[in-house]
Image: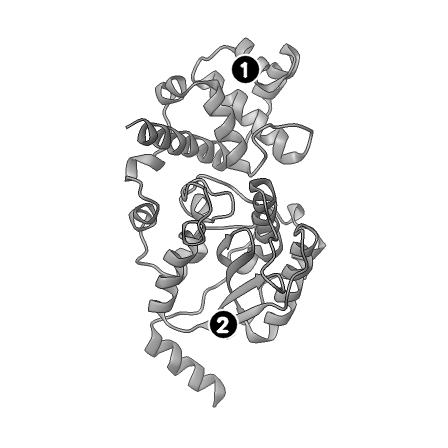
């Protein structure tokens, strides 16, 4: 009878159970992700809004770098069930789809993972069910406007703690798949997301070679770093940094920009630049970098107007 009642509630609310999207590459997930895989019983899936904060709302993530690290962590740990996330300085919002029986394990996995990044202790996670389509629609705007709502001095479209970039294809965080939100809200359009952050549709069109050339090497490198969720300095040899360097080399070659200028921008040798330009880069990542070039260029033009 409980299952029948749940089904009737779903029909009244307009919400349908959301099947998990398999990870494209499970080897990229760590052990925390593995125990957070989606349950087999799709009919039992429900939507949950999780809020994590410190006990007295002390600052958890005081810098953009820490908010970016938290975003990467959330996508990795909750990937199979993650629809939305928003990270500000003193709290985190996450929206997931999972069975009630799996909720405690996912909540615990996320809390443990974020505790290793936050600079203050986390309070117990607050959980609220999302039971109607209207509620889910409100959550989309609420999540994307978090940094403005809390007075952070950050561009809504480029906020490292916002999932906006991931939803419009301008960032590829391992584990996050924007199709999950589309399955839950089939009528949500990219234009709807862009209007929330005040951007036209042209702002997320993939940059063409001539656009890349006009943007220049500095902006291309910045876009490639942001597309993989790496620090813009691209220091070190982590997988994300290497991917961003490869993407920068590919896009600069596509735009016929000087490799000599690129090696100065990356602090690399000529041999390293040649190697990066010949090493493969996943097509979704190159597309994300191209979209991000357009996004950054739109913001530069908007600021100059």
Q: Is residue 223 above or below residue 95?
A: above
**x, y (%) of residue 9?**
39, 80
Residue at the image position 57 percent from the left and 51 percent from the top:
75
Looking at the picture, does residue 271 appear above or below residue 241?
above
- Identify which residue is drawn at 69% across, 29% down: 237
In the image, 182 versus 131, the foreground residue is 131
Could you classify mark 1 by the number of other residues whose Cα lies within 10 Å: few (under 14), some (14-19), or many (20 or more)? many
Q: Dot 1 lies on which element? A: helix
Above/below status of 66 relative to 17: above
Q: Secondary structure at mark 2?
A: strand
Residue 112 in percent (x, y) is at 69, 59
Write down the quadrant of residue 234 in the picture. top right
Mark 2 highlights which residue?
A: 128
Residues at marks 2 and 1, CA–CA distance in whole angstroms: 48 Å
Judged left or right of residue 177, residue 275 is right
Q: In which quadrant of the rendered view does residue 236 lie?
A: top right
Mark 2 vs mark 1: which is more N-terminal? 2
Residue at x 71%, y 55% (from the top left corner): 31
Residue 269 in view here? yes
Task: Please tell me which residue lies in front, 277 or 67.
Answer: 67
Position of residue 305 in the picture relative to residue 99 (left or right): left
Looking at the rendered structure, which numbered label has been put on residue 262? 1
Q: Position of residue 84 (x, y in %)?
A: 47, 56
The quarter of the image holding the C terminus is top left
Mark 2 against mark 1, which lies toward the viewer?
Answer: 2
Q: Position of residue 85 (x, y in %)?
A: 50, 55
């Amino acid at each position: 009878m409980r299952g029948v009642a749940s089904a009737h509630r779903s029909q009244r609310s307009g919400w349908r159970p959301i099947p998990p999207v398999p990870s494209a590459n499970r080897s990229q997930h760590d052990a925390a992700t593995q125990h957070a895989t989606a349950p087999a019983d799709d009919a039992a899936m429900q939507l949950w809004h999780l809020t994590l904060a410190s006990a007295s709302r002390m600052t958890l993530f005081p810098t953009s770098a820490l908010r970016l690290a938290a975003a990467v962590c959330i996508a990795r740990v909750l990937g199979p069930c993650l629809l939305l996330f928003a990270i500000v300085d003193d709290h985190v919002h996450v929206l997931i789809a999972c069975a009630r029986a799996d909720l405690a394990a996912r909540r615990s996995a996320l809390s443990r993972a974020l505790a290793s990044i936050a600079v203050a202790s986390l309070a117990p996670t607050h959980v609220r069910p999302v039971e109607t389509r209207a509620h889910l629609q409100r959550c989309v705007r609420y999540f994307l406007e978090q940094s403005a709502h809390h007075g952070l001095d950050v561009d809504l479209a480029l906020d490292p703690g916002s999932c906006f970039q991931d939803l419009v294809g301008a960032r590829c965080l391992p584990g996050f798949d924007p199709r999950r939100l589309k399955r839950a809200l089939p009528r949500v359009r990219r234009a709807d997301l862009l209007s929330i952050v005040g951007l036209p549709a042209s702002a997320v069109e993939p940059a063409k070679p001539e656009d890349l050339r006009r943007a220049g090497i500095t902006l291309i490198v910045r876009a490639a770093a942001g597309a993989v969720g790496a620090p813009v300095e691209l220091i070190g040899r982590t997988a994300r940094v290497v991917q961003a360097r490869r993407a920068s080399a590919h896009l600069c070659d596509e735009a016929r920009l000087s490799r000599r200028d690129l090696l100065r921008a990356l602090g690399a040798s000529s041999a390293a630049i040649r190697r990066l330009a010949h090493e493969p880069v996943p097509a979704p990542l190159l597309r994300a970098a191209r979209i991000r070039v357009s996004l950054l260029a739109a913001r530069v033009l908007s600021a100059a107007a």
